Image (spheres, helix red, strand yellow):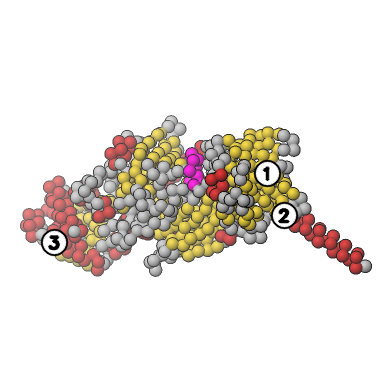
């Protein structure tokens, strides 16, 4: 009886072992066309996930062996091979060899059922050089096994699509470098395969910086445009062709910030086998940026005010060339080529597409103007700090198609397509108030920190880039927002058939021109007759984060004999600005020459000077309702003199 029980127990143990042995099934090998990564596709799961193991080169006496999630990874010399044994696994489809073409690292990969009872599947990588064995790293997301065999994962692949409107596939973004032929051992069938990294980005870990999160992985980041809810408290970003370590799935992280009033969280979820969703929760989430490192493997998420003050490289890149092409099918392509890998972020706001190159010290103003001066779609370039440059493309009349980047990040291509007439009509009906936002942040004087990688409704008028003198430090230059009051459907006050909106714009443009000659960065809330809400103007200024905000208006009253000059402020930090500009604008010389009077510096709760974050003033340059003063305000000479006095006051304050 005891012998019978022992036999039964032994049989049960063997059955249990056999059942356990079939717990993982190896399906195939996916070869990355960049010649850097191989993915072993499987069914089933490992108990422990997302652990990395580096395998050293063995010495002459023997091989080195380390365990990774119950997987044995070891190297063999003469011939040079990297071997992975997967226990408790069975191979689907039979043993085969993959002959690798155009690879600098590999000549062959073999996949076989190495043994049965115990079940072990073996993958052998035949390596061209013994020194390359130390470069192998093995990861797993719990189902697939990722083998990396180069420190720079995507250095030699041509291009990958990093930003798309909807995540739709684009055949132009799938060039092939590495090729392979697979031969099945059991029937000697030979098949040419097209290597393509089915899951081309593997998100393996999250690091917290003092002011942001760094998502790190291997492969090539490719993501869809960010979507926001109505009140800008939830933002969603989809990583295409991506998977993640299971330990990260459904996890929420605080996005660190040194400022108490800036708080947000990031939640990571696996949508399916090829998509990862990033969800931000907080306030004013359009102020957050998603910065891609030059190797395409890290994504830094942080508030824009921190990004603008962070050094992402110790060496600034420069522009090698620009190129613009437009074809008869309506496609417009902008090419940017750099001498060094670029770190970049992109976003869309108020009918503009923005691309920030966060390590571009010289955008080559002369070449930029020469290349794009005849382009039918105007593009603007701005230096937003000493090491950062912003490119702005108005897309009111364009559909965004895709953005490609060379994997060495030395070339970025942006593709747009002109909207059809019906699309333009829809866009016009849904966007009555258009504003050209440059979204420039003000640099701080705090020490920069290297974060991402080591080493460190109408056509918008876009001004031509101004070449900066070599002896001017771009980081020390000041930024001023000029707001010509009213505009478009809002005419402002009307006197004698003269519209206030036109007077305001005329003087504002003179102020803009004169400040630019003094190497001041000037941003106009409007450069033409267009309708803007008060909120538009405030948001515009707060995005730019200028040194000062100046709103220009013309006064009016039912009492036609009222006349004179006023300067208004509301916030305490704006009083000094108001006093200095007033002393120049309403000087005794001007009062006498203009035959007017000083109505003083007035504290007023006007919306724009109440809600703008920068020191802000509103200038009333005379009364349009007064016949005598109006007749002088419409003259070119008076407008020049008013502009000169305002500029003089602004420069005195900024100094």
Asked whether residue 154 is drawn in magenta, I would say yes
440 relative to 52 in the view: left or right = left
Name which of mark 3 and mark 2 comes first in the sequence. 2
Region of the chain picked out in magenta, as a range: 152-162
Residue at 52% x, 61% y is 267
Name above or below for residue 581 compared with residue 424. Answer: below
Are the residues at dot 2 and dot 1 in contact (C-beta closer than 8 Å)?
A: no
215 relative to 643 in the view: left or right = right
Q: Which residue is mark 1?
A: 111
| Residue 108 image offset from top left, x and y in percent | 62, 39
Nearest the viewer among 157 and 88 is 88
The residue positioned farthest toward the front in the image shown: 61
Asked whether residue 543 is drawn in magenta, I would say no
Nearest the viewer among 379 and 315 is 315
In the image, which disc is placed on residue 88? 2
Q: Which residue is mark 3?
A: 583
How busy is the neighbourhood of tag 1: few (under 14 within 10 Å), some, or many (20 plus)? Answer: many
Work out how far the residue at label 3 is from the one at label 2, CA to CA, in angstroms: 85 Å
Residue at 42% x, 37% y is 333
Name which of mark 1 and mark 3 comes first in the sequence. 1
Residue at 63% x, 51% y is 62
| Quarter of the figure with residue 339 | top left
The C terminus sits in image quarter: bottom left
Name which of mark 2 and mark 1 comes first in the sequence. 2
| Residue 557 image offset from top left, x and y in percent | 20, 60
Q: What is the magenta segment's predominant secondary structure? A: loop
Nearest the viewer among 129 and 115 is 129
Q: Is residue 422 visible?
A: yes
| Residue 497 image offset from top left, x and y in percent | 21, 48
């Amino acid at each position: 009886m005891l012998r019978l029980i022992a036999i039964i127990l032994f049989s049960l143990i063997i059955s249990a072992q056999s059942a356990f042995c079939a717990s993982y099934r190896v399906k195939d090998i996916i070869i990355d066309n960049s010649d850097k990564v191989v993915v072993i596709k499987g069914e089933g799961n490992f108990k422990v996930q997302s652990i990395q193991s580096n395998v050293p080169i063995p010495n002459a006496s023997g091989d080195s062996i380390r365990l990774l999630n119950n997987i044995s990874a070891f190297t063999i010399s003469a011939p040079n091979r990297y071997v992975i044994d997967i226990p408790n696994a069975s191979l689907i489809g039979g043993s085969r060899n993959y002959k690798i073409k155009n690879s600098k690292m590999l000549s062959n990969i073999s996949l076989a059922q190495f043994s049965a009872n115990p079940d072990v599947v073996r993958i052998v990588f035949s390596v061209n050089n013994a020194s390359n064995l130390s470069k192998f790293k093995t990861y797993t997301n719990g189902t697939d096994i990722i083998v990396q065999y180069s420190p720079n994962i995507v250095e030699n692949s041509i291009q990958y699509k990093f930003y798309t409107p909807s995540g739709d596939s684009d055949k132009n973004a799938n060039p092939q470098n590495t090729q392979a032929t697979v031969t099945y051992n059991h029937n000697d069938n030979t098949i040419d395969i097209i290597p393509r990294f089915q899951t081309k980005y593997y998100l393996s870990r999250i690091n917290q910086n003092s002011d942001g999160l760094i998502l790190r992985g291997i492969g090539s980041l490719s993501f869809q445009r960010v979507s926001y809810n109505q009140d800008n408290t939830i933002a969603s970003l989809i990583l295409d062709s991506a998977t993640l370590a299971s330990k990260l799935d459904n996890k929420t992280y605080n996005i660190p910030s040194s400022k108490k009033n800036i708080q947000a969280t990031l939640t990571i979820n696996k949508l399916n086998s090829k998509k990862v969703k990033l969800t931000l929760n907080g306030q004013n989430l359009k102020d957050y940026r998603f910065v891609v490192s030059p190797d395409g493997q890290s994504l830094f998420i942080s508030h824009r005010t921190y990004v603008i003050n962070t050094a992402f490289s110790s060496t600034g890149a420069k522009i090698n060339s620009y190129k613009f092409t437009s074809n008869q099918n309506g496609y417009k392509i902008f090419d940017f080529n750099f001498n060094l890998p670029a770190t970049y972020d992109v976003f869309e706001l108020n009918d503009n597409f923005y691309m920030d190159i966060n390590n571009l010290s010289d955008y080559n103003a002369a070449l930029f103007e020469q290349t794009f001066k005849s382009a039918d779609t105007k593009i603007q370039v701005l230096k937003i700090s000493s090491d950062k440059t912003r490119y702005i493309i108005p897309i009111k009349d364009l559909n965004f198609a895709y953005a490609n980047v060379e994997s060495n990040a030395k070339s970025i291509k942006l593709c747009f397509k002109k909207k059809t007439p019906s699309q333009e009509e829809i866009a016009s009906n849904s966007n009555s108030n258009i504003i050209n936002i440059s979204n420039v942040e003000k640099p701080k004087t705090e020490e920069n920190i290297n974060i991402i990688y080591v080493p460190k409704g109408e056509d918008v008028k876009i001004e031509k880039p101004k070449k900066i003198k070599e002896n001017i430090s771009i980081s020390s230059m000041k930024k001023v927002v000029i707001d010509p009051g009213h505009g478009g459907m809002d005419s402002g006050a009307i006197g004698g058939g003269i519209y206030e909106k036109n007077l305001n714009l005329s003087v504002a443009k003179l102020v803009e021109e004169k400040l630019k000659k003094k190497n001041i960065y000037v941003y106009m809330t409007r450069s033409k007759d267009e309708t803007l809400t008060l909120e538009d103007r405030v948001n515009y200024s707060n995005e730019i984060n200028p040194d000062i905000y100046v709103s220009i208006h013309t006064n009016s009253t039912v009492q036609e004999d009222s006349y004179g000059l006023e300067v208004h402020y509301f916030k305490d930090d704006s009083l000094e600005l108001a006093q200095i500009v007033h002393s120049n604008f309403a000087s005794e010389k001007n009062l006498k020459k203009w035959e007017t009077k000083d109505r003083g510096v007035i504290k007023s709760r006007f919306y724009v000077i109440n809600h703008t974050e920068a020191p802000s003033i509103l200038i009333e340059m005379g009364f349009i309702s007064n016949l005598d003063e109006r007749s002088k305000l419409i003259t070119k000479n008076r407008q020049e003199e008013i502009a000169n006095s305002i500029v003089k006051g602004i420069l005195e304050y900024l100094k």
